[in-house]
């Protein structure tokens, strides 16, 4: 009896302990799930059960529902904030000693904006909008440690930041005030009314297209005429008529000369006199290859500067300008291989008005595709932002005392040299001067280098971990408040070291190709390799069965670090069935259905190498290994499997997309291709936005665009791996390429991209690598 009671007591105790253990597990799991659920709420509804792809009835024994394990499977989602911004990191929580210590470390140049006082139109408005959306802007001006620079567009004496705003500032870190005067009118008004203020010892930087004599302060003010170029030509720049093909003239210039210099004067006027003596005014003989039009008479000047913005600027600077480009200069330069830029002799200083004339002429040459020929000496725009070697590869400089040799120098320039000059000139103009946004980035880079700040690390597409309410599957989405988070101060020191290391590692040509506005941990041309692994990025919409077999096929792929599924479907992947995996699988839920999403620089990509895949692309582990080994030896190239070509149709006078058998290729499809993740940054931030918009409109050609961008930067063709040209997906539903107008659309893409780039960067090759191990 006692034994029975003892056994009963033991059983009750064991049952109680089991219940307690079960309750503790349920409680801990519930807390974990609730914690994840409480962090963010879902933005859209889940997929209806009757339309759920990958429901339990579609599964086989190789697949199971994903459990919550951040090291195994993760899910992401996107929002619709598209503004390029970094977080505002303050130092309010630090003590005075800690704050002063951090202020001595390398920091990023941030700025705030003064109140808008100009009309909501014109170049001032466009400039303000570009500053407003710049990633370095801080929302407030009243914090003394986050925004050391206050920028105002046009002068506003009621919002001046010095000396009033500096009363509470530490003496070692005063807030500087920068005023941008975008037009000649605003520059003259400011300089004529604030001479005493400019000459006073206040932290004021003036950026203007021209300065009255005696008002320019070297090493403080910035003379740049780019914004006046926008005022004259407009910001809707088109490269459709600036191609690098044959041009009618060897060299041209079309300017008006107000007055001839006296015999005691030297400079740009003497250059014009030399050109006048060299060739008769108005001669437009194609046989001679020259069109040197220098208007001097009143009737000629009336035609040179007709009513409009050109005439308005000349009238505002009457008595100061010796010469100025004619209104037809852009059209004339588009017909010429070279364009004359009369700079003058070396004794001319940068505060004289002639700098305004020749900088405008320089911009006209670069934007029209004509190689600038600078006769004389003069400081080029943004000397601290634009590499002098890039300038040297984009222009021809002839000393003032050798100006009589100009034509012989141009005629001796080879076709190869001309193409190189045009290529780098196009790169320089597009990167630094294309529009007001490019101008703002260039100006901030110039200021950052001048004031000793560190370039920011390249912005990633920041993501946030999230959990679905209906399951315990985590996923990520883009944080609308912190889309581009600023690195820690310790990272800024590393960024400076990276900048110095890459300057030592990269050769001249590689350094020129590198994006100058940000620091990158690794670039395709660096000699340091982070790791011999790659990330597979798969674009997905709604073909679940195709995707899961693709995932299953990747399980044995060597060197695979992780898999990222870019989810383009509008519905949430809250009940998504995934295969068992030995590597992390991450799902990024994009905000919109765009083919450009496959090339986003996501922060969840942790490797240098990226394998871009379509869900219907089936590659064996051996093929993947071969492709990855080829890429490791060619890290600046696009290395892939399916290849295509392009050709010129002389009858239609247009380029065509070639998908049939060909002995050469110029395009590797990104349905299966390795590339460096640096190109994700250049595709998203550097490539002209018109191309991404065109891709969204046509829902096609993102792979062609990536080929254009990489070939444009490297001047190298892609590399095809294996002899096969087609990799069919048996059992797949109709793909994009099955549409009747698919190939016509891709031909249109090639022609449109060539128009935007101003030339055709694609390069044919016959090289393929088969048995590379």
Image (spheres, rainbow, N blue to C red):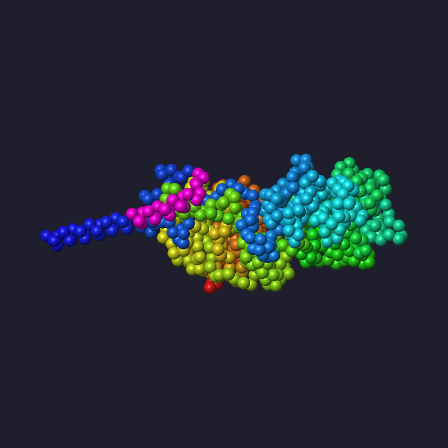
- 612 vs 27, nearest the viewer: 27
Visible residue check, residue 546: no
Going by the image, does 249 lie left or right of 606? right
Residue at image location 86% in from the left, 52% down from the top? 265
* Magenta portion: prevailing SS class: helix
- Relative to residue 773, is residue 60 depicted above or below? above
Residue 219 locus on image (x, y percent): 73, 53
Depth check, front residue: 605 or 119: 119
Membership of 152 in magenta stretch: no
**Residue drawn 49% across the image and 45% down it:** 478
User: Which is nearer the eye, 694 or 407?
Assistant: 694
Tell me if residue 522 can be seen.
Answer: yes
Instruction: Name the residue: 31% across, 49% down.
Output: 25
Tell which residue pokes out farthest to the right in this image.
263
Q: Taking 662 as reference, is 68 left or right?
A: left
Q: Quadrant of residue 179?
A: top right
Magenta range:
23-44
The image position of residue 275, as x and y in percent, is 82, 51
Q: Position of residue 79 (x, y in %)?
A: 49, 42
Q: Is residue 162 left or right of residue 721?
A: right
Q: Position of residue 99 (x, y in %)?
A: 58, 53
> Residue 560 lies in what quarter of the image?
bottom left
Left or right: 396, with 448 as reference point: right
Please say whether residue 35 is one of the residues in the magenta stretch: yes
Q: Residue at x 55, y 49 (%)?
A: 92
Q: Nearer the viewer, residue 201 or 527?
A: 201
């Amino acid at each position: 009896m006692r034994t029975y009671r003892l056994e009963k007591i033991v059983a009750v105790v064991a049952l109680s302990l089991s219940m307690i253990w079960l309750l503790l597990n349920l409680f801990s799991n519930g807390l974990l799930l609730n914690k994840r659920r409480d962090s963010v709420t879902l933005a859209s509804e889940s997929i209806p059960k009757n339309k759920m792809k990958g429901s339990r009835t579609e599964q086989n024994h190789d697949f199971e529902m994903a459990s919550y394990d951040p090291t195994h499977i993760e899910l992401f989602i996107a929002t619709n904030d598209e503004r390029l911004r970094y977080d505002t990191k303050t130092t309010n929580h630090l003590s005075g000693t800690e704050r002063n210590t951090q202020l001595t470390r390398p920091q990023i140049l941030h700025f705030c904006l003064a109140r808008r006082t100009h009309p909501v139109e014109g170049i001032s408005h466009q400039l303000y909008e570009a500053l407003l959306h710049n990633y370095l802007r801080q929302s407030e001006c009243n914090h003394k440690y986050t925004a050391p620079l206050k920028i105002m567009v046009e002068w506003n004496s009621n919002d001046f930041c010095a000396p009033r705003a500096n009363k509470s500032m530490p003496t070692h870190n005063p807030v500087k005030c920068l005023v941008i005067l975008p037009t000649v009118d605003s520059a003259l008004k400011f300089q004529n009314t604030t001479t005493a203020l400019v000459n006073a010892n206040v932290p004021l930087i003036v950026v203007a297209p021209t300065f009255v004599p005696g008002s320019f302060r070297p090493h403080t003010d910035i003379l740049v005429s780019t914004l006046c170029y926008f005022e004259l030509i407009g910001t809707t720049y088109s490269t459709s008529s600036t191609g690098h093909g044959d041009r009618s003239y060897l060299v041209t210039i079309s300017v008006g000369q107000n007055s001839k210099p006296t015999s005691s004067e030297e400079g740009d006027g003497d250059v014009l006199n030399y050109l006048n003596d060299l060739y008769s005014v108005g001669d437009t003989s194609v046989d001679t290859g020259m069109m040197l039009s220098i208007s001097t008479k009143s009737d000629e000047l009336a035609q040179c500067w007709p009513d409009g913005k050109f005439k308005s600027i000349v009238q505002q600077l009457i008595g100061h300008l010796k010469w100025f480009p004619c209104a037809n200069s852009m059209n004339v330069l588009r017909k010429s291989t070279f364009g004359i830029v009369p700079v003058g002799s070396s004794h001319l200083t940068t505060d004289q008005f002639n700098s305004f004339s020749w900088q405008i002429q320089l911009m006209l040459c670069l934007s029209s595709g004509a190689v600038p020929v600078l006769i004389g000496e003069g400081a080029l725009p943004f000397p601290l932002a634009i590499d002098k070697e890039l300038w040297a590869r984009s222009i021809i400089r002839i000393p003032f005392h050798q100006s009589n040799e100009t034509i012989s120098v141009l005629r001796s320039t080879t076709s190869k040299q001309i193409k190189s000059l045009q290529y780098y000139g196009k790169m320089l103009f597009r990167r630094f001067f294309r529009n007001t946004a490019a101008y703002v980035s260039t100006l901030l880079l110039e200021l950052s280098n001048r004031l000793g700040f560190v370039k920011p690390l390249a912005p990633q597409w920041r993501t946030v971990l999230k959990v679905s309410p209906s399951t315990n599957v985590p996923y990520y989405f883009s944080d609308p408040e912190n889309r581009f988070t600023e690195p820690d101060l310790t990272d800024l020191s590393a960024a400076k070291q990276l900048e110095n290391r890459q300057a030592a590692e990269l050769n001249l040509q590689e350094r020129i190709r590198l994006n100058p506005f940000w620091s990158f941990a690794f670039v395709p041309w660096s000699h340091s390799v982070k790791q011999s692994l790659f990330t597979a990025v798969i674009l997905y919409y709604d073909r679940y069965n195709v995707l899961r077999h693709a995932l299953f096929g990747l399980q044995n792929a060597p060197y695979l670090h992780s898999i990222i599924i870019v989810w383009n479907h509008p519905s949430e992947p809250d009940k998504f069935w995934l295969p068992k995996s030995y590597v992390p699988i991450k799902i990024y839920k994009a905000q919109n259905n765009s083919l450009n999403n496959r090339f986003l620089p996501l922060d969840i990509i942790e490797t240098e190498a990226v394998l871009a895949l379509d869900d219907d692309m089936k590659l064996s582990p051996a093929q993947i290994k071969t492709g990855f080994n080829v890429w490791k030896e060619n890290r600046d190239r696009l290395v892939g499997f399916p290849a295509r070509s392009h050709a010129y149709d002389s009858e239609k006078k247009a380029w065509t997309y070639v998908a049939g058998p060909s002995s050469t290729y110029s395009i590797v499809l990104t349905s299966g291709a390795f590339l460096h993740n640096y190109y994700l940054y250049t595709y998203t931030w550097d490539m002209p936005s018109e191309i991404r918009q065109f891709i969204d409109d046509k829902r096609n050609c993102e792979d062609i665009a990536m080929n254009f961008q990489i070939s444009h930067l490297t001047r190298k063709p892609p590399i095809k791996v294996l002899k096969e040209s087609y990799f069919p997906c048996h059992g797949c539903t109709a793909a994009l390429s099955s549409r009747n107008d698919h190939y016509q659309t891709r031909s249109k893409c090639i022609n449109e991209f060539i128009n935007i780039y101003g030339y055709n960067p694609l390069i044919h090759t016959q090289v393929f690598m088969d048995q590379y191990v």
